[in-house]
Amino acid sequence: MVYDWQFIALIIIAVLITGISKSGFAGGVGVVAVPLISLKASPAFAVAVMLPLLIVMDVFSLKAWWRHRIGGVLWLMLPPAVLGVALGFLTYGRFDENLLKVLLGVFSVLFGLWGLLKPFRGRILPTWVGGLSGGIAGFTSFIAHAGGPPLNFYLLQRRLTREQFLATAVVFLAAINLVKLVPYGMLGLLNVENLTVALMLFPVAWLGVRLGLIIQQRLSGELFFRIILGLLILLGVRLILDGWS
């Protein structure tokens, strides 16, 4: 691994964006972290370094949002999400990651456009959709820390306030990140080199979380949800381009 200035700049930007995303935008934009780092390093290195940082960000975010979580939604989505993580572990190295990126990207773009062009929020979907979204989020989170889009797909259609939306997303993603520690460790991804790099980036992770909290407090509820949907579209395009190339 060559730690030149380009690599250092990319990884700092990736961690900062992820911190802002996790505390201020329900983790949606954090999916760019792995593609960004992968421009100068392997995807395995990217996901391994990001996991400890994500857990640190989760700790900071949980302090701010824990009391607003919606337990019923979490109990619906978390068990399938654990199964999704297990599926990611069992198929590690066998699944076409580029195909996954394209599918997730198309899903994100279509949903984002639907949300912006059609007033749909508040239309509660069947519970099985929540379970399926949780399972997909667990799988995509294991592969590339990309659980945000499937999670947001279901949460955006619940009758949640901005605080409830953020809190539920933060708790869900925090739980899944803890679950991922076991399979990541079994795969040898959490080695000394990766953990050392992650440790040096802890201050950047903290700064990103703080910035996210500040930005979120300055947004109206409607603007917040529109930003989430807009980010889904942009991230979807990015995922399609990454997977297609």
Image (cartoon, rainbow, N blue to C red):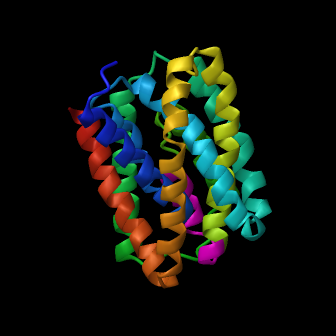
The stretch drawn in magenta includes residue 245: no
Residue at point 61% right, 26% down? 87
**Foreground pick, 33 / 237:** 33
**Above/below status of 111 relative to 135:** below
From the viewer's perspective, is 239 left or right of 177? left
Q: Residue 193: x percent and y percent?
A: 50, 20
Residue at point 33% right, 51% down? 236
* Image quarter in which the C terminus is found: top left
Residue stretch rendered in magenta on the structure: 148-163
Residue at point 62% right, 58% down? 169
The stretch drawn in magenta includes residue 160: yes
**Above/below status of 129 relative to 87:** below
**Foreground pick, 115 / 209:** 209
**Above/below status of 29 relative to 202:** below
* Image quarter in which the N terminus is found: top left
From the viewer's perspective, is 191 left or right of 126? left
From the viewer's perspective, is 212 left or right of 130? left
Q: Residue 152: x percent and y percent?
A: 53, 59
Q: Residue 108: x percent and y percent?
A: 39, 54
What's the magenta bit mostly, secondary-structure-wise?
helix
Q: Which of the 4 image quarters holds residue 189?
A: top right
